[in-house]
Every structure is written in C-alpha cells, then in structure tokens.
Amino acid sequence: MMNQAFAWQWPEPFGERFCFVRIGMIALKPRALPQMWRFARAVDRSSRQAMDQKSGLLKSERMILRWNHCGFMQYWSDPELMMAWTHTEPHTSWWKEVLERQRKRQDFAIYHETYVTSKTGFEAIYLGLDTHRPGASSFGQLVPPKGRFATAKGRLAEVDAPVLTGQASTVNPSKS
C-alpha cells in the first residue's frame, strides 16, 4: 500500500452531501495556553463520544498549527446531524465556557468554518499511505486513480477523463 496511489470515491450511504468543519483555538496570551489544551482535550473526548454514539461524526483530527494555535478537522456524514450534535452535551457546556473565557479575559480566540459539499464537490488523492488513514481516506472508498479518477477534474466532475499513463502525449497539428 505504501507505493500505491488511491483516489477517494464517494461512499454511497452518504446520499448527496456531507460536511466538514475546521475548528481552531488560539491562545492570545501565554496564560491561556493551559486552557486551550484543556479545551482541545474536551473536543477530543466529545468527538470520540460522537463517533461511538453514531452521531454522524466520521473522523476528527487534531492539528497543531503554531505554538499557540491548535485546531481540528472534522468530517460529518450529514450537515443536519452535525448541527443537532452542536446543541447537545458535552458540546454546549464547553462552548459556553469558551465564550465566558473570551468575555472575561479576552486572552483566547476560537473559530470554526463549516463546509457543506455535494457528491461532485469533493475530491481527494492519497499517495504512499500506510495503515494510518488521514482525513476522508478513513471512511471513503479508495480506488485506483484510473479513468475518471485519474485527474482532479475527473473526480470532481464525475465524467470520463483520460487515463494517465505517465508517457508524454504526441500532438498532431492539423493542417490549414
């Protein structure tokens, strides 16, 4: 698997759309670092709980972006399931705590971006994966990048695309 390339294929049970969320936390002052890591662990715990309860969360990955900035990328099978989860515990408790921290101390920032995509609006390619399956590779079907899966344009448009051979193409100029 290490030397192979794989294209991501839309899982049929998804229906027509799914969403992913980018969440970030920034300690604006050094005193906020312990709180940032506490919130990050809370997101990790609640994400595991959401996945265990089959709440629609497919994958959650924590990322360190800078010494004072960590974030998460989450993949949800359905935007409505993600919205419903945000209105339940434990999410509501730690969200209120984050807002209170910001209101009182203003030493901590948080953001999230939600992207809803359709079957034709998401594509991915994976090269050299081992058993670690990052992002959408952990829940999507991986297929050889041939036919329409050979190019990003083909994966996005769901149309037949040329098979890439690695050979230079020859062009026969037409005579006028």
Image (cartoon, helix red, strand yellow):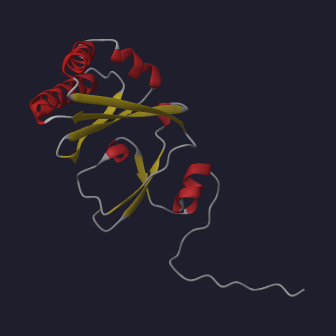
The answer to whether any part of residue 43 appears in the image is yes
- Considering the image in quadrants, where does the N terminus appear? bottom left
133 left or right, relative to 172: left
* Res 93 → quadrant: top left
Q: Nearer the viewer, residue 7 or 122?
A: 122
The answer to whether any part of residue 61 appears in the image is no
* Res 128 → quadrant: bottom left
Residue at 22%, 28% (x, y): give it.
Answer: 108
Query: Quick one: which residue is furthest to the right in this view?
Result: 176
Q: Nearer the viewer, residue 24 or 83?
A: 24
Residue at 64%, 53% (x, y): give it.
Answer: 159
Residue 143, compared with residue 135, is above or below; it is below
Relative image position of residue 142 (x, y in whole percent): 41, 51
Q: Nearer the viewer, residue 79 or 28?
A: 28
Q: How many marks?
A: 0
- Considering the image in quadrants, where does the C terminus appear? bottom right
Relative image position of residue 57 (x, y in whole percent): 33, 28
Residue at 22%, 14% (x, y): give it.
Answer: 100
Relative image position of residue 122 (x, y in whole percent): 50, 45
136 left or right, relative to 44: right
* Res 37 → quadrant: top left
Relative image position of residue 76 (x, y in whole percent): 39, 30
Residue 117, compared with residue 127, is above or below; it is above
Residue 134, compared with residue 59, is above or below; it is below
